[in-house]
Structure formats: structure tokens, C-alpha cells
Image: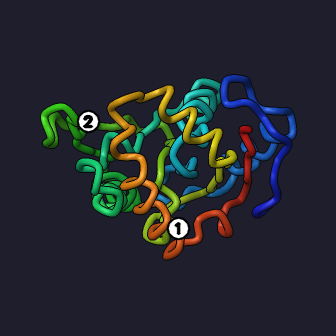
């Protein structure tokens, strides 16, 4: 299963039976963050992570922490990764509740705190959730992949003019991050979305 691409699936549709079975096997793994099995959905911007995570959370009834809520702005990829580990994963590993602060993109600052109920499973989604620092806490890691032109088209259709001036800036951070962490090579499952 490690690094083996699953059959292509549209991010707007449900998983193929093979991919669903692979996800089920990942969720059957032992918890590595205290009593919580954490499943990470990682990939570059526009790959289909959010859509896939929403479908997985609905299918397996588990809460989702989205990295977009943790990054402190357009230059905050690494700070968002630190927030995931310090606010969510490490506390869970110590038997404490996960508690994280949502970044308010319009205000340019962190806003209210959120807590995640103890459910035994948690989904984390977004660029950086499969980092080397997060890896010891993860029960499974899914890499979501799409062609560069498809990713860009999806991201700009989703976020439009808000994202356009930041596309290259964010992509440069992704390049540096993936060069340092090689998340794709450590993935338990690769899902190609287009």
C-alpha cells in the first residue's frame, strides 16, 4: 500500500472500493496520538485534499482539523505545521484534548479557540499535515495528487482573485517544504484526483 497509487477518483465523487478499503485498513491501525487514530490527508494546493477529507469525515464520522485554519497567513506554512503539532497532536498524545485557534484570514490574526471531541479518530487535512514532525502521531497518511494545471485551475476556481496574487508565493513554500519532508514517499496511500 505504501506509495502505491490508487485508481483515479474525482474529488467530487466517493472513493473507489479499493481506496475505501485502503482507508479502512489505515483506520484499523493502532492509535499513535494517545488513544486517537489520526489520519492525514496531504498534497499540494488544489489537489483535492479538502473535498476528499470532507467525504472521508462523513463516511467514517470523524472530526476534521484543516491546516487552512492553522496557517498564520500566506507565509505561514511552517508555522501552521508547528501549530498542528503543538495544539493538536502532542496534546492528544499526552491524553489531553486537542485545542486549536482558527486563523482569521480577513482580520490577519488568530481568532477563537476550537476543541475537538474525543472520538478515537481525527482527520487532519492540508499542506504540512504529513510533515516529519507530525509523522510520529499519525496512524495513516494519504497523499492526494493531481496534475499541476488541474491543481491551479481548481484552486483559482475555488478561491479566485483572493488566491491569484499568492499562488507562486505559496507554491514556493510547498516546494521547500516537500523537498525537506518528502511526504509523498512516506504516504501509505496515494489517490490521484485528476
Secondary element at image label 2:
strand
Q: In which quadrant of the rendered view does residue 15 lie?
A: top right
Residue at 37% over, 37% down: 163
Residue 36 in the image: x percent, y percent?
A: 49, 50
Residue at 19% over, 37% down: 113
Q: Is residue 42 left or right of residue 63?
A: right
Q: In which quadrant of the rendered view does residue 83 lie?
A: bottom left
Q: Would residue 166 be visible to someone looking at this image?
A: yes
Q: Is residue 19 left or right of residue 145?
A: right
Q: Would residue 37 be visible to someone looking at this image?
A: no
Q: Quadrant of the N terminus?
A: bottom right
Residue 46 in the image: x percent, y percent?
A: 55, 40
Q: CA distance from mark 1 to mark 2?
A: 28 Å
The circle on residue 152 is none
Residue at 34% over, 42% down: 165
Display coloring: rainbow
Lower position in the chain sequence, tag 1 or tag 2: 2
**Label 2 neighbour load within 10 Å: few <14, some 14-19, many 20+:** few
Q: Is residue 38 left or right of residue 5?
A: left
Secondary element at image label 1:
helix
Q: Nearer the viewer, mark 1 or mark 2?
A: 1
Q: Which residue is mark 2?
A: 114
Residue 84, compared with residue 161, is above or below; it is below
Mark 1 touching mark 2, by CB under 8 A? no
The circle on residue 178 is 1
Amino acid at each position: 500500500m505504501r506509495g502505491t497509487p490508487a485508481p483515479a477518483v474525482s474529488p467530487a465523487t466517493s472513493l473507489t472500493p479499493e481506496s475505501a478499503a485502503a482507508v479502512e485498513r489505515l483506520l484499523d491501525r493502532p492509535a499513535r496520538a494517545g488513544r486517537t487514530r489520526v489520519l492525514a490527508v496531504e498534497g499540494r494546493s488544489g489537489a483535492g485534499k479538502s473535498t476528499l477529507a470532507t467525504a472521508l469525515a462523513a463516511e467514517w464520522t470523524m472530526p476534521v482539523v484543516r491546516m487552512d485554519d492553522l496557517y498564520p497567513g500566506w507565509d505561514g506554512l511552517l508555522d501552521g505545521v508547528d501549530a498542528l503539532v503543538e495544539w493538536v497532536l502532542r496534546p492528544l498524545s499526552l491524553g489531553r484534548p486537542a485545542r486549536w485557534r482558527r486563523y482569521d484570514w480577513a482580520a490577519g490574526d488568530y481568532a477563537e479557540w476550537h476543541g475537538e471531541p474525543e472520538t478515537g479518530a481525527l482527520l487532519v487535512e492540508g499542506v504540512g499535515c504529513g510533515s516529519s514532525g507530525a509523522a510520529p502521531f499519525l496512524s495513516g497518511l494519504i497523499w492526494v495528487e493531481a496534475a499541476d494545471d488541474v491543481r491551479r485551475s481548481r484552486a483559482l476556481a475555488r478561491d479566485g482573485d483572493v488566491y491569484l496574487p499568492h499562488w507562486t508565493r505559496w507554491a514556493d513554500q510547498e516546494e521547500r517544504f516537500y523537498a525537506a519532508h518528502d511526504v509523498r514517499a512516506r504516504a501509505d496511500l496515494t489517490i490521484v484526483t485528476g
